[in-house]
Amino acid sequence: MADEQLKHHIHDVLKDGYFNDIDDLVDISDGPDDSIHVVVVSRKFDGRRMKEKNDLIWSELTQNLSPEQWGLVSLSIGVSPEEIKAT
């Protein structure tokens, strides 16, 4: 199980940073072993390609976390609400 304090810190980094709109959803969960999964749902992803979405998430993580901390993130997914509706 991943460190709870680190999961809260990652959530706060994303919500206090680029994904600070009231409608932006940031979900942090346990990955395998002690890794962490990050899912962000935001209108800021509208019309963006997968690489652009990942770059937005990882830019926040690498600027605000130590390499040891962001190195525990094993999965990051960015999706717009419209993409969820289409599935």
Image (spheres, rainbow, N blue to C red):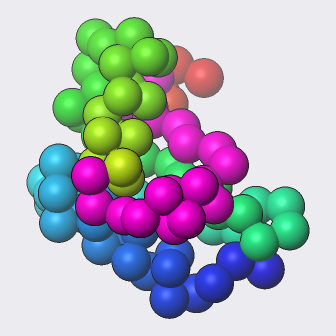
For the point 30% across and 40% down, the residue is 59
**Residue lying farthest to the bottom in this orientation:** 5
Q: In the image, residue 43 lies at what x, y percent?
A: 24, 33
Residue 57, by quadrant, is: top left
Q: Nearer the viewer, residue 73 or 68?
A: 68
Inspect this view and state whether residue 27 appears.
no
37 versus 78 height, above or below: below
Residue 3, by quadrant, is: bottom right
69 versus 24 height, above or below: below
Inspect this view and state whether residue 5 appears.
yes
Q: Could you tell me how many numbered marks the image carries?
A: 0
Left or right placement of residue 74 versus residue 70 in this view: right
Q: Nearer the viewer, residue 23 or 59?
A: 59
**Residue lying farthest to the right in this orientation:** 33
Left or right placement of residue 4 versus residue 66 in this view: right
Residue 64 is a magenta residue:
yes
**Magenta stretch, residue numbers:** 63-83
Q: In the image, residue 37 lies at what x, y percent?
A: 63, 56
Q: Quadrant of the C terminus?
A: top right
Q: In the image, residue 68 lies at what x, y percent?
A: 55, 65
Q: Nearer the viewer, residue 68 or 21?
A: 68
For the point 64% across and 44% down, the residue is 75
Left or right placement of residue 54 versus residue 21 in this view: right
For the point 28% across and 61% down, the residue is 64
Residue 70 is a magenta residue:
yes
Q: Quadrant of the N terminus?
A: bottom right
Q: In the image, residue 30 lies at what x, y percent?
A: 71, 68
26 versus 11 height, above or below: above
